[in-house]
Image (cartoon, rainbow, N blue to C red):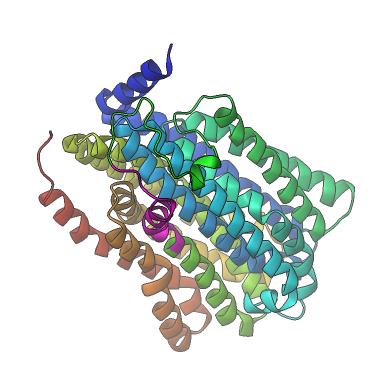
Amino acid sequence: MSDTEKKQSQLKFMTETSTSRLVLKLGLPTTVSMLVTTIYNMADTYFVSSLGTSQSGAIGVVFGLMAIIQAIGFTFGHGAGSNIGRFLGKNSAHEAGRYASTSVFFGLVTGITLSVFGLCYHTPLMYLLKSTDTILPYALQYSFYILLAAPIMVLCCILNNILRYEGKATFAMIGLVSGGLLNILGDFVTIKILNLGVSGAGISTAVSQCISAVILLTPFLKGKTQSRINLRDVFSRKQNAREDSDHRAYKPMIFVLGSILAIGLPSLMRQGLGSLSTIILNAYANPFGDAAIAGMAIASKVVNFIFCVGLGIGQGFQPVAGFNYGARKFSRVKSAYRFTLILGTITLGIIGFTGCIFAEPIISRFISDPRAIAVGVPALRYQAAVIFIMPIQVTTNMLFQSTGKSVRATILSATRSGLFFIPTIIILSNLMGLTGIECSQAIADVLSSLLAIPFAVRFFGNMPGDE
């Protein structure tokens, strides 16, 4: 089959297959990828927790750093992927390749910059992330390897998102699942057998990310994707339309980069504020000791695991929305949105209910300190009880990002971990002490989801008919 026939076949698949089937087909491997990624993050927590409470606190502190790294990766990955999906919907593969190449190049440059800066100011960075003096030695050990691997972690995020937006979610799943399983095995070997302590968890994470990057690059190198990564396209001054049907004026590199950053801004806002919220959470938990930081960190990890199910389903919706919006098949965007919302609400409702019932045994599996358990259990129950409402916020946010509505997507991205969470934890921690800290995220989740409803209603109310 020629490249042109492959393009037409993929376009037909994305714009004519039942939207519910598409969301399931693309969302299932994405959900598996997200769950495995979260599992290996939780594996670090599980194995490190056997070393002590302060060591567990170090995982919570460095989680803020990993959120920054992921923010960079998702900014370039979602920014490029949204454009790629819409260009492929217009049958413009070369232009899609320019966005892929530009995101990879500048993502790596940004990741290297973060790595160098972080290693040069290592201790101040850990204090900025609200490490205590007792947690600091372990946070430095763990974060050293995370900073070394930062450029590769950014690359993995970018490649994963490009593959998803192309409708190649299975390739993305293979790369992430392989790295995740290796990371779990690596944690066991480095911590339990080699007795490398917290450093072992960092080494295992860094190595597994490198392997994931190689696997995720393979489809691009073997020509299995429509968007090709060629760094010469980043700075090229010539248009190469080749087999594209979109022959509009050539866009300079600064325009391509600007479009990636503008559409990726919601991801930067979401992940960046996620990192900021972790810092603030650690700061307000700090007066209650290392056990409070460890308990909240473990509860957050478990909730993120549950949340990844909804996020995976939503990310299966993104390429469907991008392709069909680019092809101007708007009714399919609406039907895919409706199906994703219903499926996510039911699924997260069932899992969240289970999390509420079994909160204590779940938290106890990760740490034995009764003080940390006493903090983690109510925090998990509060968030698990309301997580069923989160698909409204997540699906609406991804709708706007996939269709290029970056301003609205950015506003919604800023709510959960920023505009609502930060004032909530400040107010409730002063009014209710530790209990206020434990329930702050749950309240922010409800408020951010309610805000998304009028945004979605207005968007679909103004949507034109199919062309």
Q: Position of residue 144 (x, y in %)?
A: 76, 62
Residue 253 is one of the magenta-drawn residues: yes
**Residue at the far top in the pictured view:** 1
In the figure, 291 relative to 262: above or below? below
Q: Main secondary structure of the magenta part?
A: helix
The magenta region covers 249-268
The one of 144 and 404 positioned closer to us in this rendering: 404
Query: At 30% across and 35% down in the image, what residue appears?
Result: 323
Q: How many marks?
A: 0
Identify which residue, 274 or 310, lies in the foreground.
274
Q: Is residue 427 above or below residue 110?
A: below
Q: Is residue 289 above or below residue 267?
A: below
x and y percent of residue 145 in the render? 75, 57
Position of residue 226 measured from the top left corner of the image (x, y, whole percent): 44, 29
- Determine which quarter of the picture holds residue 333: top left
Image point (46%, 88%), residue name: 430
Q: Is residue 266 left or right of residue 467?
A: right
**Is residue 259 covered in magenta?**
yes
**Camera-side residue: 359 or 101?**
101
Image quadrant containing the N terminus: top left
Query: Residue shown at 74%/68% (left/top)?
Result: 119
Q: Please give the name of the residue rendered at 50% of the width and 56% of the height, measured from the top-left corner.
A: 303
User: Would residue 442 appear left or right of 154 to someone viewing this image?
Assistant: left
